[in-house]
Amino acid sequence: KRIRRIFEQVKGRVAGCVYYSEGPYEDVNKILVQRFYWDDAPAHETLAAYARFYFPGVRTDDFLRLSALLEDNQECLDKPTPAARRRADEAVALARKMDGEILPSMRMSARWRMMLIRAELDALFLETKDWSAPRSQELLGELVRLYHMEKVSPEAFSATRPPVEEGECRQ
C-alpha cells in the first residue's frame, strides 16, 4: 500500500524508474516499484508472481495474506493493539504453515528466512515490546547474517542493521 501511494504521486509525470538499494531486506519493495513503473500492474499480481518464483510449494493466496498481515502490522509496532496482536499471531501461524510447504531446497533461502523472521519478530515485539529478549536477539542475529553485516558496527548503519546486542553477531 505504501509503495502504491508513492507511485501514485508520480504516475503520469515520469517515464521509467531506476530503483536502487543495497539492502536485501527491501527485495519485495524493489520488485513492486519496478513493476509499477514497467506496466502499473496491481501489487497482488506482482506479489503472486514473486511467490510462485521464489517460494515454490507455497500457496500464492497464503503469501498474499502473509504480505498483507505484515504490511498492516508495520505501522502498529510502536502502538500495539489487540487487532495487531491477532494479525501477528495469524502471520506467525501462516508463515510456519508455509515453511512446511515450501520446497526444502528453498526453505533456507534468504528471501524466505526474512519473511519468516519478520512474522516472528512482529509477534515477539508486540508481546514483549523488547528487542533485547533472547528469541528476538536470536532472530535479529540471523538477519544480520542474512544482510552480510556481521562486521559492520551498529553505529555505522543504524538504519539498516538490526538492533542486535554487541556479542550476538560477531561470530
Image: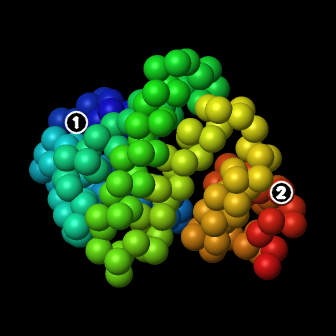
Q: Nearer the viewer, residue 139 or 158?
A: 139
Horizontal arrangement in the rendering, residue 87 relative to residue 53 (left or right): right
Question: In front: 40, or 15?
Answer: 40
- The percent coordinates of residue 11 (x first, y second) are 22, 36
Residue 161 is tagged as none
Q: Is residue 106 visible?
A: yes
Earlier in the chain: of badge 2 and badge 1, it is: 1
**Image spot of residue 94 (x, y percent):** 36, 47
Horizontal side of 95 relative to 78 (left or right) equals left
Describe the colour scheme in one phrase.
Answer: rainbow
Where residue 67 sits: x, y (%)?
35, 44
Q: Helix, strand, or loop for circle 2? A: loop
Residue at figure coordinates x 63%, y 41% from the top left? 124
- Residue type at mark 2? Glu
Residue receiving disc 1:
11
- Residue drawn at point x = 75 percent, y = 38 percent: 130
The residue at the point 56 percent across, 39 percent down is 123
Quarter where residue 109 is shown:
bottom left
Q: Residue at x 61, y 63 (%)?
A: 143
User: Marks 2/1: CA distance?
Assistant: 42 Å
Q: Is residue 92 above or below residue 107?
A: above
Residue 165, numbered circle = 2
Left or right side of 4 for 162: right
Q: Secondary structure at mark 1?
A: loop
Farthest right residue in view: 167
Give the amino acid at mark 1.
Answer: Lys
Q: Quadrant of the C terminus?
A: bottom right
